[in-house]
Amino acid sequence: MEEYIAAMPKAELHVHIEGTIEPALVQQLAIRNNIPIPSSISSLADTSSGYSFHDLTSFLAVYYPNMAVLLTSQDFFDLAYAYLTKAHSQNILHTEIFFDPQAHTSRGVSFSTVVTGLREAIVQAERELGVSASLIMCFLRDMDAQSAMDTLIEALQYKDWIVGVGLDSDERDNPPSKFSDVFARAKQEGWLVTCHCDIDQKDSIEHIRQALEEIGVNRIDHGTNIVEDKRLVQMVREKGIGLTCCPVSNSVVTEDFKGKEILELLRAGVKVTINSDDPAYFRGYVNENLIKMATDTDISREELLILQRNAFDISWISEEKKKGFL
Ligand code: ES4
Ligand code: ZN
């Protein structure tokens, strides 16, 4: 089964570039930039053992401080090129990568530093590895809507390098509707729209409803709690709106990887996909996420293929390019 999964041509639609930074790269960049090695690394026995945390709060407490090592365009290039090399090694043909500009501009790193480094890695990886990649700009939902709008305006200079926008970070009391104006402007500019609706939130169903009915998203990131509302399930099925699910991430930040719900949605005809989220932290890239589904649910080989067809299907690549993959 592992070989079958490894050999499948795959697309990834939910991966945070900041969540792909392996401990060894954090250490290397800290040394190169002559800054202190973050405590998440200095407390490890060696850089091959994973980061230590046990839930979303303790994850974020490691995640954001580690970003301090990302300072120059070269750092962002190295980060993205390392991820793209790993994705290519897993037979990922196309990947849509989230980045969080505000996590960097708020520390004094410019938008252009971030986006030019990421973009150059994508161009070089396409040329050297043949892997296809796009960027999705995410807004931090625990910051205010004005900051998101300012970020959007700045990003317009790089409009063609960004395929769409999303919403991530701490969902509690930060509903999609807080960013209605920002998403409306993003759509006006021709960007596609997605939105994290994380697992088992206080207002999961209401947030999913807002994303679908008020924002008009093209996809939902996670969104697995939609199983609790038949009407919304029917809506995404009819409209072909996809969900980007992340089983290994789920198993770390909640007590349940939601395999049963993911499979139920797949079998109901919803376009669900399997993704890695923050692979360096959760210790699982796409193959490991698919292996978890294969090991811990009764999913068939045929259904594993459908997951991948869904991923290409709901990806934000041109119809023409899509045909080349399918
Ligand atoms: C995230 Cl697991 C998770 N939750 C919310 N925001 C995030 N950004 C990156 N990973
Ligand atoms: Zn995510």
Image: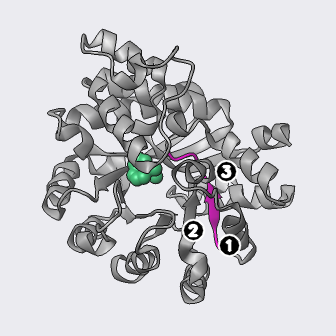
Callout 3: helix, strand or loop? helix
Q: Residue at horizontal 35%, vertical 17%?
A: 29
Region of the chain picked out in magenta, as a range: 270-277
Callout 1: 10 Å neighbours few (<14), some, many (20+)? some
Q: Which residue is mark 2?
A: 224
Q: CA distance from mark 1 to mark 3?
A: 24 Å
Label 1 vs 2, first from the N-terminus:
2
Name the residue type under label 1: Leu
Q: Which residue is mark 1?
A: 265
Cβ of mark 2 under 8 Å from ligand 2: the answer is: no
The answer to whether 103 is drawn above or below residue 196 in the figure is: above
Callout 2: 10 Å neighbours few (<14), some, many (20+)? many
Horizontal and vertical percent position of residue 46: 52, 14
Horizontal and vertical percent position of residue 168: 36, 56
Name the residue nearer the viewer: 201 or 286: 201
Callout 3: 10 Å neighbours few (<14), some, many (20+)? some
Q: Residue at horizontal 44%, vertical 34%?
A: 122
